[in-house]
Image (cartoon, rainbow, N blue to C red):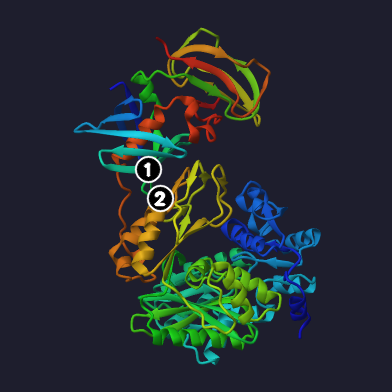
């Protein structure tokens, strides 16, 4: 028995204190599980996030640096220092930032702090896209034709001509759509190559690129894995075809396009990859599913996914709890048994996992869907969520908060669980229609259009669906909205709830004309 | 109609005369009228028109009005100069646009001013900023003096409409 396992067996709580090295909704969400487990939590904040909800989500919070992520949430030494000062014996990295950084995971280990994620060796083998492609190919998992490394524009053109245009350039070291470019012809390669490299360098601190044939049309389907270094278990798939800028907008499980045979083959491929890397923790293997039912391995995410609630809603599992239990040396069976309790469906060790109904998640982002999905900033004047059984909101925002331009535009995730796809879709639409977020332009209206669209109703969703279609223009203000505006405007000044706590003191309010003399 | 919404959406005027009696709102939409009972419930306004009931949220931002109905949000610019020209009776508060020092106070209590007249000059970041009257009116209050340090949002001058 390893020391960690002995530790796990001896104590009820796997860790003394956990530092959450992230921000926004995921930091809030991880703190929730830590609280449920009775483990004290520490959050970290940049100067821009002092008043953000995640700063108050844990038991204590440490300021780690200036607003730019490179100086705060990506600042490994500041985060490790915060862990040391607060006495945290484990770090949960969330997603993005340092979550897939093998060097950081190794630094944690050297300092005796448990990194809640896979060992750096597993991460290096699967987290790096080029290495993962090689591993997958060696295990007989189908990969998209391409090249693991293209060190120059010339090499990229040669490889692209070999597999045939269009091709996709990708950052070896990261995900989340950054450092990715579709290249239609050799003449576009130079600009695309340079742009992808710059993005990769700034987002992941690693500018290596790989090249793949662009499979089109395709669906994006991924398999959730829970593994303990020996055993790996597949927890079903998620379809995440609806994307913009290669970033997911809507995710669901199960995928309407995946039959039981394809599912079994994909799950088997994902389990094989996890076992080959002696992987411990949660992991996602991503695949492209072609129109003919063939699938290709894309990449592995060696961390918790943004869309993990989709799987949680169907399985009743708490994947963060499972991560923590496994990081403390627990087995898959133990993690499944204990992580299921919180969700209400107590799975007994060894019992087959049951996935019930259908779940769909929509990502609410501060961006203008009608103007190239440009990120938006501003102050949240009103925030009201829709509450309903089977609807979950994972939010990292609060009324009165100012949104800074430094980080990802994801504000919250709205997830609906229903007995079937249509039930989940209807519930999610109800939740979106019942949500009010004023003061910052968001994609809320666009998400409604997307979920109401015939293509989504018929589950004909592909990776190009969002960006290749003409979407409805912003609607006219309904009469009810004008009536509400009139009621608001004619309220006695003292009654104005929303006005009261927002702009009563704004100098812009009644400033009139002013300028430099 | 005794009141009006004077807003702009994407450059297009949204001008809606309306009346309010208690919770009843009557909108004059040109070719038709819309009548509803509107009640505030926290951040929401419950709008009942005939049998249908919907909820809308409204907020005033620094320069815009926001309204959300059925998950769709509409942003409208406040159309102040036009509202003033049409005689919407309101009080203007001239507030400090930044933390700084008052260099000069041109406004005198009781004086009649025209739109664009200089009221106060503030110095900040080694630059001078001239605060002028947003519309015609009477200076009803002067709350600052030359040389005084002011904070962002401090009330400096109050204007009242000429009667």
For the residues labelled 2 and 1, the Cα–Cα distance comes to 8 Å
Name of the residue lying farthest toward the left: B31
Comparing A515 with A82, the one in front is: A82
The residue that disc 1 covers is: B55
Judging from the image, what secondary structure is the residue with disc 2 in?
loop
The residue that disc 2 covers is: A434
* Circles 2 and 1 on the same subunit: no
Q: Position of residue A57 (x, y in %)?
A: 64, 54
Comparing A220 with A191, the one in front is: A220
Quarter where residue B151 is shown: top right
Q: Write the residue at 61% across / 81% down.
A: A333
Which quadrant of the rendered structure holds the N terminus of chain A? bottom right
Is B83 located above or below residue A255 in the figure?
above
Which quadrant of the rendered structure holds the C terminus of chain A? top right
Is B151 located above or below residue A73 in the figure?
above
Q: Write the residue at 34% across / 80% down.
A: A291
Q: Chain of mark 1?
A: B
Disc 1 crowd, CA 10 A, few/some/many (<14, 14-19, 20+): many
């Amino acid at each position: 028995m390893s020391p960690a396992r002995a530790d796990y067996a001896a104590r009820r709580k796997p860790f003394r204190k956990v530092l959450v090295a992230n921000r926004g909704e995921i930091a809030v969400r991880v703190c929730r599980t830590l609280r449920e487990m009775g483990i004290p939590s520490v959050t970290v904040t940049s100067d821009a996030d002092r008043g953000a909800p995640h700063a108050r989500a844990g038991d204590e919070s440490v300021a780690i640096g200036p607003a730019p992520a490179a100086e705060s949430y990506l600042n490994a030494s500041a985060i490790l220092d915060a862990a040391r000062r607060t006495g945290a014996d484990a770090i949960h990295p969330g997603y993005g930032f340092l979550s897939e950084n093998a060097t950081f995971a190794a630094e944690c280990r050297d300092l005796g702090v448990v990194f809640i994620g896979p060992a750096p060796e597993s991460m290096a083998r699967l987290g790096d896209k080029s290495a993962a492609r090689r591993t997958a190919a060696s295990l007989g998992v189908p990969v998209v034709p391409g090249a693991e490394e293209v060190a120059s524009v010339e090499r990229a053109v040669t490889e692209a001509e070999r597999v045939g245009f269009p091709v996709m350039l990708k950052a070896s070291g990261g995900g989340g759509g950054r450092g990715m470019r579709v290249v239609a012809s050799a003449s576009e390669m130079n600009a695309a190559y340079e742009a992808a490299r710059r993005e990769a360098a700034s987002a992941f601190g690693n500018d290596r690129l790989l090249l793949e044939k662009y499979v089109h049309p395709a669906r994006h389907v991924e398999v959730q894995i829970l593994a303990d270094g020996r055993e790996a278990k597949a927890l079903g798939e998620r379809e995440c075809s609806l994307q913009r800028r290669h970033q997911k907008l809507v995710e669901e499980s199960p995928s309407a396009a995946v039959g039981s045979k394809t599912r079994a083959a994909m799950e088997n491929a994902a389990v094989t990859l996890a076992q080959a890397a002696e992987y411990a923790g949660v992991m996602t293997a991503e695949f492209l599913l072609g129109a003919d039912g063939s699938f290709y391995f894309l990449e592995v995410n060696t961390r918790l996914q943004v869309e993990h609630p989709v799987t949680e809603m169907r399985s009743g599992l708490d994947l963060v709890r499972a991560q923590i239990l496994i990081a403390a040396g627990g087995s898959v069976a133990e993690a499944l048994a204990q992580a299921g309790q919180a969700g209400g469906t107590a799975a007994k060790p060894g019992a087959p996992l049951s996935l019930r109904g259908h779940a769909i998640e929509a990502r609410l982002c501060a961006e203008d869907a009608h103007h190239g999905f440009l990120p938006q900033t501003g102050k949240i004047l009103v925030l009201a969520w829709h509450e309903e059984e089977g609807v979950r909101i994972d939010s990292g925002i609060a009324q009165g908060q100012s949104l800074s331009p430094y980080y990802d535009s994801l504000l919250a995730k709205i997830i609906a669980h229903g007995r079937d796809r249509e039930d989940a879709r209807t519930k999610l639409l109800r939740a979106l229609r019942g949500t009010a977020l004023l003061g910052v332009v968001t994609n809320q209206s666009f998400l409604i259009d997307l979920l109401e669209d015939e293509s989504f109703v018929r589950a004909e969703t592909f990776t190009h669906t969002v960006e290749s279609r003409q979407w409805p223009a912003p609607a006219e203000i309904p009469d009810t909205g004008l009536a509400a505006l009139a009621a608001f405007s004619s309220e006695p000044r003292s009654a104005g709830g929303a006005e009261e706590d927002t702009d009563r003191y704004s100098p812009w309010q009644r400033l009139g004309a002013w300028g430099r003399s | 109609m005794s009141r009006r919404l004077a807003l702009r959406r994407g450059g297009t005027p949204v001008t809606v005369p309306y009346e309010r009696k208690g919770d009843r709102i009557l909108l004059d939409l040109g070719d038709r009228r819309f009548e509803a009972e509107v009640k505030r419930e926290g951040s929401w306004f419950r709008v009942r028109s005939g049998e249908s009931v919907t909820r809308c949220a409204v907020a005033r931002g620094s320069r815009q009005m926001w309204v959300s109905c059925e998950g769709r949000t509409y942003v409208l610019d406040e159309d102040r100069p036009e509202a003033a020209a049409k005689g919407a009776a309101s009080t203007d508060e001239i507030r400090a646009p930044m933390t700084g020092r008052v260099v000069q106070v041109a406004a005198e209590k009781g004086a009649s001013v025209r739109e664009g007249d200089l009221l106060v000059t503030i110095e900040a970041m080694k630059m001078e900023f001239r605060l002028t009257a947003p519309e015609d009116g009477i200076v009803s209050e002067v709350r600052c003096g030359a040389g005084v340090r002011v904070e962002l949002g401090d009330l400096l001058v109050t204007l009242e409409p000429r009667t």
